[in-house]
């Protein structure tokens, strides 16, 4: 038994599923084609408590990681791209404000994000610093009582549409995890510019882009956490964020399995439904087995997160396995659907493109293997 088997979360799952089928499913493919974010769905979701349920109650959340997990998985079953942007706002951005921000920052930034009125993003990656996150060259320097930030961030989810930005920078001359600072910046601040959304393979209704920081000058009100502690804070939050990512794989894989089973029962070749061919059954069976194993492990992982346990190894195991699993599931679903699966008219083509990001974003599969090995060998 995990949280997912409790009646309140079964009911929440049913409600979130109904919402997604009504509000998100009819527009998911169109927004993917148009490469624009469905703001109106976010607002409706927020009104039902589906944005930031894990965030503290006093700012509009429900202090409920399990609710976040249930809504996250159901969203990804319908539109991975929508959830990618929602999650960058209510987990990557808002969770960091909730964990490391002061009272004023929490009051200023959390309620509008939870209400779906404002969108946040979290910016670490740079053109020359991806997996090697500590090699970032965006800098902060003191100028009297001000901080001046210079640098460039790339591949940032929501950068083109965000109102609020968390930007990670380092003190010039500092190295490794020393000298880091996280700043909360706002659109309109002098020196902060964002580029046009990148053209992407998948997650296309989630705008991704660059942030240019050219002498952005802020007071300590915009400093998140303690000066110099930015990287340590970041790593302490990253485990939680990485623990949720495999739910994207679970959601997309469930959508694939649903499509594959339905199609296999309907499609007839050689005088019978293709579901009667054992080579097709093998694909369905393996897909289902791998999905259930991943799902149960991820629910266990979310329970550890909710208990405040350290989950570095477990989060990496879940992310590695689940992201490989969903890529196999999407590939096999297309195979089961033959030429139809390859056509853009069918949703599985979108699932196949979306799944690839899960082996890259929030730490590549290679990096997850290194983390697991490091934990084993220490
Ligand atoms: C759609 C999208 C959204 C994103 N959103 C955000 C966001 O909101 N915020 C943010 O900060 N970042 C974001 N990212 C960035 C993402 O986290 C990075 O792309 C990812 O960490 C990999 O970095 P990289 O792309 O620079 O690849 P690189 O680090 O250059 O890696 C290239 C290849 O080398 C491999 N490699 C690297 N180091 C090693 C090693 N030591 N051993 C073995 N192999 C290695 C990698 O696994 C990979 O296969 C996003 C990326 C994408 C594509």
Image: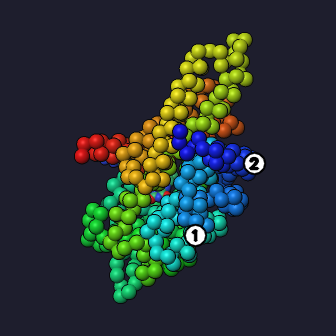
**Is the residue 90 above or below the residue 10 in the image?**
below
Q: In which quarter of the image is residue 40?
A: bottom right
Q: Which dot marks residue 22?
A: 2
Image point (64%, 29%), residue name: 260
Tag 2 secondary structure: helix
Residue 191: x %, y % from top left: 48, 77
The residue furthest left is 378
Residue 30 position (above or below residue 278) = below
Residue that carries the numbered disc 1 in the rendered image: 58
- Rendered residue at 64%/64% (across/down): 116
In this rendering, is residue 284 above or below 4?
A: above
The residue located at (46%, 80%) in the rendering is: 221
Q: Where is residue 128 in the image (x, y as percent from the top left)?
A: 37, 58
Tell me, yes or no, if residue 343 can be seen here. yes
Q: Earlier in the sequence, mark 2 or mark 1?
A: 2
Is residue 25 among what the camera can see? no
Q: Which mark is residue 347?
A: none
Question: Is 279 left, or right, of 180 in this rendering?
Answer: right
| Residue 52 picture quarter | bottom right
Query: Looking at the picture, does residue 159 appear above or below residue 271?
Result: below
Instruction: Give the camera-side residue of 295 and 146.
Output: 295
Tell us which disc is closer to us: 2 or 1: 1
Distance from Cα at disc 2 to Cα at disc 1: 30 Å
Look at 70% across and 62% down and name the residue there.
47
How many numbered marks appear? 2
Q: Is mark 1 on a helix, strand or loop?
A: helix
Number of other residues with Cα within 10 Å of mark 2, as a class: few under 14, some 14 to 19, many 20 or more: few
Given residues 255 and 133, the one toward you in this image is: 255
């Amino acid at each position: 038994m995990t949280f997912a088997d409790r009646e309140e979360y079964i009911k929440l799952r049913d409600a979130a599923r109904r919402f997604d089928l009504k509000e998100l499913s009819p527009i998911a493919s169109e927004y993917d084609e148009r490469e624009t974010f469905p703001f109106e769905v976010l607002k409706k979701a927020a009104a039902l408590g589906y944005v930031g349920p894990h965030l503290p109650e006093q700012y509009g959340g429900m202090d409920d990681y399990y609710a976040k997990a249930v809504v996250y998985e159901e969203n990804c079953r319908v539109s991975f791209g929508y959830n990618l942007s929602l999650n960058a706002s209510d987990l990557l951005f808002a969770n960091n404000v909730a964990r490391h921000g002061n009272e004023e920052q929490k009051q200023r930034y959390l309620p509008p994000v939870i209400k779906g009125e404002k969108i946040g993003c979290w910016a670490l990656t740079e053109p020359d610093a991806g997996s090697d996150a500590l090699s970032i060259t965006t800098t902060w320097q003191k100028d009297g009582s001000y901080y001046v930030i210079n640098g460039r961030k790339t591949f940032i989810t929501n950068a083109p549409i965000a109102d609020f930005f968390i930007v990670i920078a380092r003190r010039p001359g500092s190295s490794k995890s020393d000298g880091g600072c996280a700043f909360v910046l706002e659109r309109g601040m002098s020196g902060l510019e964002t580029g046009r959304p990148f053209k992407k393979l998948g997650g296309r209704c989630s705008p991704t882009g660059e942030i240019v920081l050219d002498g952005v000058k802020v007071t300590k009100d915009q400093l998140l956490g303690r000066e110099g502690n930015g990287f340590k804070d970041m790593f302490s939050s990253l485990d939680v964020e990485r623990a949720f990512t495999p739910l994207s794989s679970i959601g997309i894989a469930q959508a694939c399995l649903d499509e594959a089973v339905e199609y296999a029962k309907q499609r007839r070749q050689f005088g019978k439904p293709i579901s009667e061919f054992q080579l097709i059954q093998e694909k369905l069976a393996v897909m289902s087995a791998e999905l259930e194993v991943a799902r149960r492990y991820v629910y266990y992982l979310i329970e550890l997160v909710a208990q405040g346990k350290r989950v570095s190894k477990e989060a990496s195991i879940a992310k590695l396995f689940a992201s490989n699993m969903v890529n196999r599931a999407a590939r096999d679903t297309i195979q089961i659907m033959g030429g139809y699966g390859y056509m853009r008219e069918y949703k599985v083509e979108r699932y196949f493109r979306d799944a690839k990001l899960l082996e890259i974003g929030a730490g590549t599969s290679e990096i997850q293997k290194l983390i697991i090995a490091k934990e084993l060998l220490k």
